Amino acid sequence: MRTKTIFFTMLLLFVMLTSSTAIAQEEEKESYGMAEVIYIMPKIGMEKAFENAVKEHNAKYHKEGVYKASLDNIITGKETGWYAWVMGPCTFSDLDNRPDDEAHRAHWDKNVSPTVAKYGQTEYWKYNNKLSYSSDDSAAPKYQNLWFIGLERGQYYKFKEFMEKVRKSYEKKGEGNISIYDNEFREGDGRDVAIVWDLKNWAEMDDDDGGIKKQFEEIYGEGSWNNALKDWEASTKTIKSQVWRVGVNK
């Protein structure tokens, strides 16, 4: 009798642990946030009309929740003048239920499309919570500095190791922000991952080492910052840096 009791007790414990693990994995799977980004170039001279048309469309169909959308403007680099329509954070499952009815499409076609010169690519960027950091005092940004990075084949692990150390350095400092996004559909075009810094103003760009070199070396030792940069250089193939003006039509 005692043997059976022990057996059923162990079996119950195993079931509870298995269920807990499955629930935790499912929660982790569902908790990610992803941004859908569509690049749009408005017609010359119709930039303001385009912004206003998108603002009206977003207010009607993308005001809140997982389908909430905003409009950013690229203001540096070869893509200056392009806009990024950004929806989310959402999941792939959310895309199956997005507002894609006839009235929604007709509203865009009637109001926004006449102001558009051409459409660019569509991308899906998944937020990497484990590598990102944002302090509690981070205010809504006016600009964002984005680095689109092409990684050397098979070197994501080196990039990840470096960014884990960077995140811990930000945590030690207790201020600042850095967001990491993984491109869900890579095309070998130098846009494997993206690093994003929120900026209140242009003056923040003067902080050339991210303001964490001191904290980095306090954690990992003197000279560790320069050594880590060598691993960074070995794992990254290309970097395209841009500044975006955030929420241009709020």
Image (tube, grey):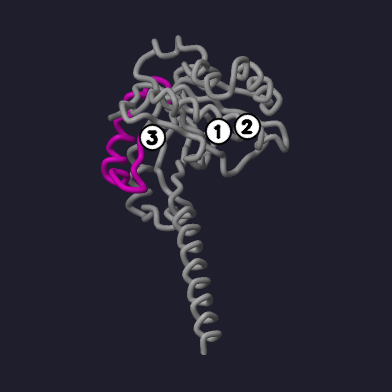
Mark 1 or mark 2: which comes first in sequence?
Answer: 2
Write down the quadrant of residue 70 in the picture.
Answer: top left
Which residue: 40% across, 57% down?
Answer: 97
**Local crowd at mark 3 within 10 Å, few (<14), some, or many (≥20)?**
some
Q: Main secondary structure of the magenta part?
A: helix
SS category of the residue bearing label 3 = helix
Q: Is residue 48 left or right of residue 90?
A: left
Question: Cβ–Cβ below 8 Å for labels 2 and 3?
Answer: no
SS category of the residue bearing label 1 = helix
**Local crowd at mark 2 within 10 Å, few (<14), some, or many (≥20)?**
some
Location of residue 184 in the rendering, given as x and y in whole percent from the top left corner: 57, 44
Mark 2 or mark 3: which comes first in sequence?
Answer: 3
The residue nearer to you, when weighing 237 against 64, is 237
Compute the Cα span from label 2 to label 3.
43 Å
Which residue: 46% across, 62% down?
Answer: 23
Mark 1, mark 3: which one is toward the viewer?
Answer: 1
Q: Which residue is mark 1?
A: 164
Mark 2, mark 3: which one is toward the viewer?
Answer: 2
Compute the Cα span from label 1 to label 2.
9 Å
Q: Is residue 156 left or right of residue 250?
A: right
Amino acid at dot 2: Phe
Amino acid at dot 1: Glu
198, above or below 123, in the image = above
Amino acid at dot 3: Pro
Mark 1 or mark 3: which comes first in sequence?
Answer: 3
Q: Which residue is mark 3?
A: 114
The magenta stretch is 43-70
Q: Which residue is mark 2?
A: 159
